[in-house]
Image (tube, helix red, strand yellow):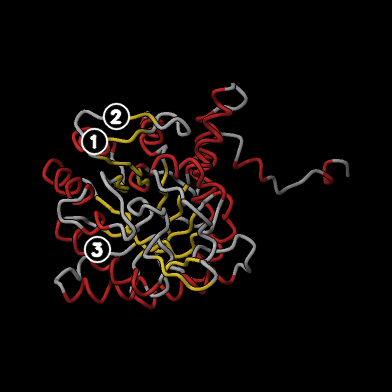
Amino acid sequence: MFLSSFPTIRLRRLRYEPLVRRLVRDTVLSPDRFILPLFVRFGQGVRKTIPSMPDQFQLSIDELVIEAEQAVSLGLGGILLFGIPETKDSIGSEAMSEIGIIARAVRAVKETVGNKLLVITDLCFCEYTDHGHCGVLSEKSNNRYEVDNDTTLENLVRQSLVHARAGVDMLAPSGMMDGMVRALRGNLDREGFSHLPIMSYAAKYASAFYGPFREAAENCPQFGDRRSYQMDPAAVAGQAVREAQLDLEEGADIIMIKPALAYLDIVRLVRERFEGVPIAAYNVSGEYSMVKAAAEKGWIDEKAIVLESMTAITRAGANIILTYWAKQLAQWLNS
């Protein structure tokens, strides 16, 4: 009678032995699912420290090539390039230049590593404009300036063709302009680049977690903010589904949610709604810097926290993770 009160179903049986735990896991991390964001600028031998992002740098093209070679050796899924121009103006002209920083960087990387590494470029203008906003400004009323959506689309098309001609493997529009995927897809197809996939920042929130990135990319808005075009963190979650659906209908191949950890509910919701569609999540600068700062204080175990965080992002439904820890993750997973 006493023995019959003991449980016959014991879930701890699947946890007791490490080999059994490994056998039954359905969330597995792999280096080829990590994309490493990198910041590139003009110069030679430049490896400029980013104070708010420990172990991250602004790189000249020769240093970028070294990073690309390391990414290949570590088996990373790819790199994502952000450019820092020599000069800025009101429309971000250098972003559309055949001799601009990103066009040069793409050519240099592809000449060195060829098809061994996926090279992705961010499509936006915030790094290139003197006002720091993501497109062309127009004055509406009462001296209030807004990003002109449709004029910006025209410039995004020009920027995308520059990157495509330089040899990029994938394009990632991040400006949250309405119709950006349709505009890009149509023109890429007409210009002979129908093979190039688009990874759309479909649900990019106006987040405080971007702070360190703005130092790294030198793209802080000179006035106002980006809340009129990036998503409201307090908006109903279904709005993200609608954004993703529109981008998919316009021709997006991969859907991205940004930031990652604070928006795992959105990752899960989009995954459930669009089963079979590749989902990316961007583990952004603020999420990176907070962990780095706490680890430097000795308050947390950086490796354990990062591996747990990446597991959570993957479990929520992301196939692809963009993270500044990509190299370290590959080293940890391969050790």
Residue 60 tag number: 1
99 or 176: nearer the eye?
A: 99
Q: Which residue is mark 3?
A: 160
Q: Residues within 10 Å of mark 1 (few under 14, many from 20)?
A: many
Residue 198 tag number: none
Residue located at (20% from left, 71% from top)? 194
| Marks 2/3: CA–CA distance | 27 Å
Q: Earlier in the sequence, mark 2 or mark 3?
A: 2
Can you say whether 20 is above or below 133 in the image?
above
- Quarter-of-image position of residue 84: top left
SS category of the residue bearing label 1:
loop
SS category of the residue bearing label 2:
strand
| Amino acid at the residue labelled 2 | Arg
Residue 301 appears at what percent x and percent y? 56, 27
| Amino acid at the residue labelled 1 | Ser
Q: Earlier in the sequence, mark 1 or mark 2?
A: 2
Residue located at (32% from left, 61% from top)? 91
**Is 155 on the left or on the right of 12, as rendered?**
left
Residue located at (38% from left, 54% from top)? 126
Q: Residues within 10 Å of mark 2 (few under 14, many from 20)?
A: some
Q: Earlier in the sequence, mark 1 or mark 3?
A: 1
Residue located at (53% from left, 59% from top)? 205
Q: Quadrant of the N terminus?
A: top right
| Marks 1/3: CA–CA distance | 22 Å
Tell me if label 1 and label 2 are in contact, CB under 8 Å: yes
Q: Which residue is mark 2?
A: 47
98 or 2: nearer the eye?
A: 98
210 or 117: nearer the eye?
A: 210
Residue 50 appears at what percent x and percent y? 41, 32
Can you say whether 200 is above or below 86 in the image?
below
| Marks 1/2: CA–CA distance | 7 Å
